[in-house]
Amino acid sequence: MSRLPAAVLLFVLLLACGEREKPLLLYDFETEEDLDRISWACHDRFSITDEWSASGLRSLRCRLPRGTYPGVRFLDFENDWRGFDTLALAVRNEGAEAVELVVRVDDRESGEEFGNRYNGVFSLAPGENSIRIPLEEIRRGPASRALDLSHIEQFLIFLRNGSDPPVLLVDRIALE
């Protein structure tokens, strides 16, 4: 048997077993083009900055507006999260007080019903925060069913109601 067919067979077996390259960096916010991968309205609210980063040189600066659930909806990401163990993100809270950050993940069956998606709440202390969410916890997020990790449709972060949201710096969002 020649080496080429054996290598092809090994590659196919690895794919069939769900082996994935770990970690998979979803967002690193190193270039202005990364702004095209979030849902945003104006440059004064979201920008790429070199004020802080968890990895690389830059991060996403979010000057969130007052209002109900201010946050960021991420676009153009890997939709199949199978084969990974954890969703990881780094967030720097520039405010003087802790705030509650919600991480929301929807699959194609989620709709708008709160109990039909993953909603994780995390306290962001002033300064650097590392959030690590086991994908099994995300999968079990909906109240009456398992979230389909092979078809993640929506991923966003937002703050719970607050009068004056702080500036957040977001960096290194990855599947590990």
Image (cartoon, rainbow, N blue to C red):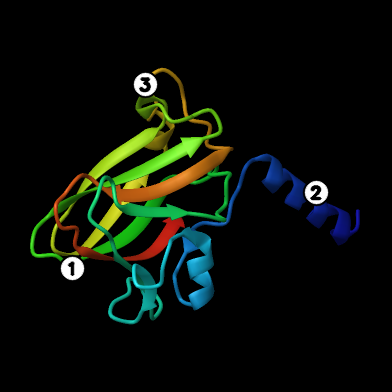
- Distance from label 1 to label 2 (Cα)? 51 Å
Q: Name the amino acid, label 3.
A: Ala
- Label at residue 11: none
Position of 145 with respect to 115 (left or right) is right
Give the percent coordinates (x, y) of residue 72: 38, 55
Q: Is residue 80 above or below residue 145?
A: below
Identify the residue at image location x=68%, y=47%.
Answer: 14
- Gap in angstroms between the C-alphas marked 1 and 3: 34 Å
Secondary element at tag 3: loop
Q: Which mark is residue 9?
A: 2
Name which residue type carries label 1. Answer: Glu
Which residue is rendered at x = 22% and y = 46% of the image? 122
Label 1 Cα crowd, 10 Å radius (few <14 / some 14-19 / many 20+)? some
- Residue 146 percent coordinates (x, y): 46, 25
- Judge from the rendering whether residue 73 lies leftward or rightward of residue 22; answer left or right: left
Tell me if residue 50 can be seen. yes
Check residue 143 in the rendering and tell me which mark sits there, or answer none: 3
Of the pair 54 and 48, the residue shown nearer to us = 48
Q: Amino acid at mark 2?
A: Leu
Frontmost residue, 13 versus 137: 137
* Circle count: 3
Q: Residue at x 85, y 60 (%)?
A: 3
Q: Earlier in the sequence, mark 1 or mark 3?
A: 1
- Circle 1 or circle 2, nearest the eye: 1
Label 3 – label 2 distance at C-alpha: 41 Å
Answer whether residue 176 is visible to the viewer in this image: no
- In depth, the one of 55 and 163 nearer the eye is 163
Tell me the residue that label 1 is attached to: 94
- Residue 128 image point, x, y percent: 21, 65
> On the image, which quarter does residue 144 sit in?
top left
